Image: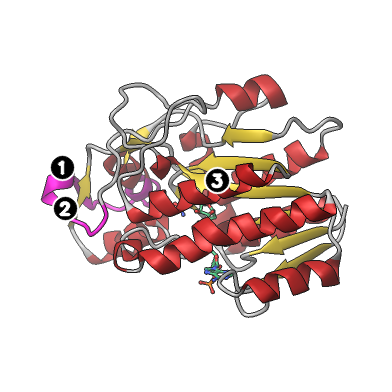
C-alpha cells in the first residue's frame, strides 16, 4: 500500500509515520508541504503521490483557541476533510480520518456509542463534526476513528504539562468532574495499522479510545505518582477553572463496535500510560 499521511509532526502523525511503514511507503507531509487551508496543495500532493490510502492526522486541535478562530478551525477540521474525501472518491481509494469525543455534549450518563446523536458544545467539536459529515457526504470509502484525551511523549499534551508543573509546584488544581479516557497516540496508530492490515476492512465510523475512564485529576494523580513526586493534585470543578471553550462532563466512548467489527479493543488507559512511560525510559 502506498500511503499519503498529513500532519506528520503532530502527536498522532509522528506515531503513524513509523507504524504505517509496515504496510508500504509512507509519503508524510507536515503543514509546510501540505497545508489543509490551501485546497490547491491538497490536490497537487495527492496527484504526486498517487496513494492507495490517505491518512489525515492533521487538525486544528487548540480547543480553546478555536473559540476565537472558529473559521480557521472549520477550514482545517470541517472543510479540508471533505476535500480529501472528494479526492479519495474520485480515485476510488480509502480515507482514514480522526475525530473526537468532543462531538458530544456530555449529558449522557453512560459511554457514548456511534449511534448517539452528536451535539458539540464548543467550536472545535462543531468543526470536527462538520469534518465527519463532509467525509460521509462524499460516499468515499472511509474509516473515521473518534478518539479522546490524546497524549504522547512529544508535542503539547496534558501528560507533559503535568510532568512540568509537578516539578515546579507543591500542589496543582485539576478538574475532577470531566470524565474521559486518556489515549496514547501510539496505541491509536497501532490500532490503525491493525485495521488497515486486516484482510476485509470493515469501513465506517468507530470509537477508538483506551478502555476504562478517569477524570483529568485522576490522570494527573497517575502522572505525579509515576514520577515519584509529592505534588498534591487538588480536585476542582469545571466551574472553578473557566476556559474559553466549554467541555463535555462525560466524553467516555464505548469501544464495543470496534471490538465487534475488528476483534480487538485498546488496553485500559492505565496500561497504555504505563507502556508510554517505559517509552520515556527507553529514550532517556
Ligand atoms: N489531542 C487530543 O487530545 C485529541 C482528542 C481527540 C481527538 N483528537 C484528534 O486526533 C487527531 C490527531 O491529533 P493530535 O493530538 O495528533 O494533534 P496535534 O498534535 O495537534 O497535531 C496536529 C497536526 O496538524 C497540523 N496542522 C495544523 N494545521 C494544519 C494545516 N492547516 N495544514 C496541515 N497541517 C496542519 C499541525 O501542524 P503544526 O505542527 O505545524 O502545528 C500538527 O502537526 C486530530 O484529528 C484530532 O482532532 C485529538
The x, y position of residue 117, in whole percent, is 42, 30
Nearer to me, 183 or 86? 86
Q: Locate the C terminus by quadrant.
A: bottom right
Residue 281 visible? The answer is no
The x, y position of residue 171, in whole percent, is 17, 55
The answer to whether the residues at label 2 and label 3 have Cβ atoms under 8 Å apart is no
Tell me the distance, in whole angstroms, between the alpha carbons under discs 2 and 3.
Answer: 30 Å
> Which mark is drawn over residue 241?
2
Residue found 71% across the figure and 61% down from its top: 5
The x, y position of residue 34, in whole percent, is 66, 73
The answer to whether the residues at label 1 and label 3 have Cβ atoms under 8 Å apart is no
Tell me the distance, in whole angstroms, between the alpha carbons under discs 1 and 3.
Answer: 31 Å
Q: Which residues are magenta?
A: 223-245
Asked whether residue 32 is drawn in magenta, I would say no
Instruction: Give the number of callouts.
Output: 3
Secondary structure under tag 1 reads loop
Residue highlighted by disc 1: 237
The answer to whether the residues at label 1 and label 2 have Cβ atoms under 8 Å apart is yes
> Which mark is drawn over residue 196?
none
Q: 10 Å neighbourhood of mark 3: few (<14), some, or many (≥20)?
A: many
Q: Earlier in the sequence, mark 1 or mark 3?
A: 3
Amino acid at each position: 500500500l502506498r500511503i499519503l499521511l498529513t500532519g506528520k509532526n503532530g502527536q498522532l502523525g509522528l506515531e503513524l509515520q513509523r507504524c504505517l511503514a509496515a504496510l508500504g511507503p509512507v509519503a508524510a507531509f507536515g503543514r509546510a508541504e501540505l497545508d489543509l487551508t490551501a485546497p490547491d496543495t491538497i490536490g497537487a500532493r495527492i496527484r504526486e503521490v498517487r496513494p492507495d490510502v490517505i491518512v489525515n492526522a492533521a487538525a486544528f486541535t487548540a480547543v480553546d483557541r478555536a473559540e476565537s478562530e472558529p473559521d480557521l478551525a472549520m477550514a482545517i477540521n470541517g472543510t479540508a476533510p471533505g476535500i480529501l474525501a472528494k479526492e479519495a472518491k474520485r480515485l476510488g481509494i480509502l480515507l482514514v480520518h480522526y475525530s473526537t469525543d468532543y462531538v458530544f455534549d456530555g449529558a449522557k450518563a453512560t459511554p457514548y456509542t456511534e449511534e448517539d446523536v452528536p451535539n458539540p458544545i464548543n467550536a472545535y467539536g462543531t468543526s470536527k463534526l462538520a469534518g465527519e459529515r463532509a467525509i460521509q457526504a462524499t460516499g468515499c470509502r472511509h474509516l473515521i476513528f473518534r478518539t479522546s484525551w490524546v497524549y504522547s511523549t512529544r508535542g503539547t499534551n496534558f501528560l507533559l504539562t503535568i510532568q512540568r508543573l509537578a516539578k515546579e509546584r507543591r500542589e496543582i488544581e485539576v478538574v475532577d468532574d470531566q470524565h474521559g479516557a486518556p489515549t496514547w497516540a501510539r496505541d491509536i496508530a497501532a490500532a490503525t495499522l491493525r485495521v488497515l492490515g486486516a484482510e476485509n476492512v470493515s469501513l465506517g465510523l468507530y470509537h477508538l479510545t483506551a478502555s476504562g475512564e478517569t477524570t483529568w485529576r485522576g490522570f494527573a494523580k497517575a502522572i505525579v505518582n509515576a514520577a515519584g513526586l509529592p505534588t498534591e493534585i487538588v480536585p476542582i470543578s469545571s466551574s472553578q477553572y473557566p476556559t474559553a471553550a466549554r467541555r463535555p462532563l462525560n466524553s467516555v466512548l464505548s469501544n464495543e463496535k470496534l471490538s465487534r467489527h475488528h476483534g480487538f479493543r485498546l488496553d485500559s488507559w492505565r496500561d497504555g500510560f504505563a507502556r508510554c512511560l517505559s517509552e520515556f525510559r527507553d529514550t532517556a
